[in-house]
Amino acid sequence: MNRYPWWKYLIMVVVLVVGVVYALPNLYGESPSVQISSTNGGKVDNALLLKGEQILDAAGFKPDSADFNGTTVNYRFSNTSVQLKARDVLAKALNPNPADPQYVVAVNLLSRSPAWLTALNAHPMYLGLDLRGGVHFLLQVDMQAAVHKKLDSIAGELRRDLRDKDARYTKLERVGDTLQGVFVDSSALNTAKELIARQHPDLQLAAQAPAGPYSLSASLTPAAVSQEEDYAIKQNIQTLHNRINELGVAEPIIQQQGRDRVVVELPGIQDVARAKDILGRTASLEVRMVDDSAAAQAALAGQGPLPPGDQIFPDRDGGKLVVKRDVLLTGDNLTDAQPGFDQQTNEPAVFLTLDSKGARIFQEVTRENVGKRTAMILFDRGRGEIITAPVIRSEIAGGRVQISGHMTVQEANDTALLLRAGALAAPMSIIEERTVGPSLGQQNISQGFHSVTWGFVAIVIFMSIYYMFFGVVSSIGLAVNLLLLVAVLSMLQATLTLPGIAAMALALGMAIDSNVLINERVREELRNGASPQNAIFHGYERAWATIFDSNVTTLIAGVALLIFGSGAVRGFAVVHVLGILTSMFSAVFFSRGIINLWYGRKRRLHSISIGQIWKPEPAAAGKTTAAAAKAPAGARSSEAASDAVKAGKPPGAPTPRSTKPRRKVH
């Protein structure tokens, strides 16, 4: 009756072992470290590892450990003060020219977990900004730049459509917040007005021509400006999410504040400069045709004017190229960007995947311009640079494009990251920066740890005294619940915040509540006269429905907080939901397994250790008898028959006399 099959005990052992393994990394903590990676041609290998050790040794710093993981060199130190001093020494020695650094020397926090745990992909859980420390940014979006970008895009589309209709113009470009054009005749002007009215309803034409009878001026409507600003702030928030996810920051907080500001909180980030660099970059890709005409080459040599519709951009070889203003493709047509290596030259490269529209346009462009050059321009921080300008040898179909040429591995990774995450719809500037130190976070961790520990100890003492052995088993189940909760948080790489610690303390109380229901149900079965084995069996079976209902209703509330909450509320909800799930396993399945293992092997079980079982007092029974004596005879006989039926005896059967000894008077 009260015996588990062997496979259930095997599940208990496996779950317990897995829980211990994946919760163990949290006991080792994290060590302050200095991380070295390549930024501009610097070579990262074992030779750099030895060189760094020599630099530190000459400066009087001894790292706790040093390793090379294939991409970065890491030195671990005992405390943050030594870490920061060592970072300055290494940065000065490895980058003698600060204007042209070859290495990125950054501070970081690395787990102290042994190699065998890391090999099993067992890592400590992430800690939130209030526990681990980190950086807080307040960024302001340049809304005017978003409007200008929209007008530039419309101008490019109009130029392309006017060429298709053979409508000639001498000027069509953005001037400030307006789009201005000058045409050669009235027919071309009317064609432009028709295109604006039909394809660009967001534009409104000015009543007065700015430069003669064949000119026009247009601007965005107020509704279009408001819509563009809303799009810019939402697109920037989404892009920031993508970039931070690529950086590996867990559970960042990115929220809009006011009309044109965004709050970003990055827990655990120590390399503030790296975070600022990635967040503030506005990298976007444009594909244009190169102008190799004689007039363009003369303008490039300074011997003539620049042809209309052309621009000059630098390339990565130190030279310059003349390209058309017309944009054929943009980063909006990208679906993926991955770093890799050129199969022919083995140089770092970025491989792009275009969407269906981009693939069709690129196929048409390459088919119509065989033998000509196309330029891929990367715009970053408002400056355009030609990454590559290959000659089109044949039509390219399928939407696969490669960018290569004079890039380091780090540059290829960063370029792919920025293109994959998407470009910012408008530039942003950091107007407030605040760093939360790890010492304050350590204090919060210490206080939260003590609250959970003392709460656990108080529950164990109470349960052990009140429920005896069953209370001890409940305490073991509670410890298993806490172990599994930490293990699941670590396996999911969830972020633990201060509200999460509060949810962990709440999970302990809810988990022990299930064991209280079970123990009281077993006591009730014993009071009703059931044998110890039957009391254990029915106690667990009949308490399960109540436990399930109460946990499901609480789980629904937790899921609602998880879906609709944000920030601290979401951190609380994550731990709360996981705590409910682990408590249902530990309180019912695990604790019953221990009880079955202890009592199930005994065939003749006369008693169990579950504390004092309170029974009705004898005085209460005497009062009932007296009340029955005053009742009418018919009522007494009816009640007796009813009691006999409840006891399983036929009505009228003789009632055994009480075995209670009579009081003797001496």
Image (cartoon, rainbow, N blue to C red):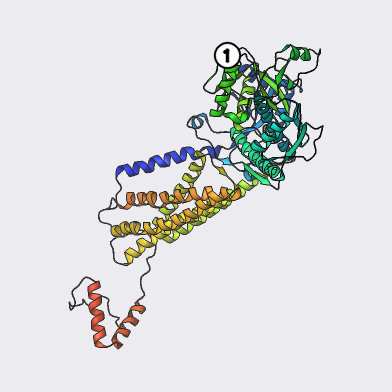
> Nearest the camera: 26 or 394?
394
**Residue 569 x, y percent position in the rendering:** 58, 51
The residue at 47%/53% (across/down) is: 555
Instruction: Report if residue 478 is visible in the image.
Output: yes
Q: Find numbered disc 1 in the image and state the secondary structure of the residue it sits on.
A: loop
Q: Relative to 321, say whether 6 is above or below.
A: below
The part of the image, by quadrant, that contains residue 38 is: top right
Give the residue pinned by disc 1.
346
Classify 391 as above or below 4.
above
Task: Count up the numbered dots.
Answer: 1
Task: Using the rendered image of the protein, determine whether residue 62 is visible from the camera's viewpoint.
Answer: no
The quarter of the picture where residue 627 lies is: bottom left
Residue at 82%, 32% in the rendered image: 212
Lateral position of residue 90 relative to residue 545, left or right = right
The kind of residue on which mark 1 rests is Asn
For this rendering, which residue is in front, 343 or 559? 343
Coordinates of residue 561 in the picture (x, y in percent) = 54, 52
x 61%, y 43%: residue: 128
Q: Residues within 10 Å of mark 1 (few under 14, many from 20)?
A: few
Residue 521 image offset from top left, x and y in percent: 36, 62
Residue 165 locus on image (x, y percent) = 65, 26
Compared to 444, does 403 lie above or below? above
Q: For this rendering, which residue is in front, 31 or 36? A: 36
Quarter of the C terminus within the rendering: bottom left
Q: Is residue 332 above or below residue 23?
A: above
Which residue does the image show at 44% across and 58% down from the upper left?
A: 550
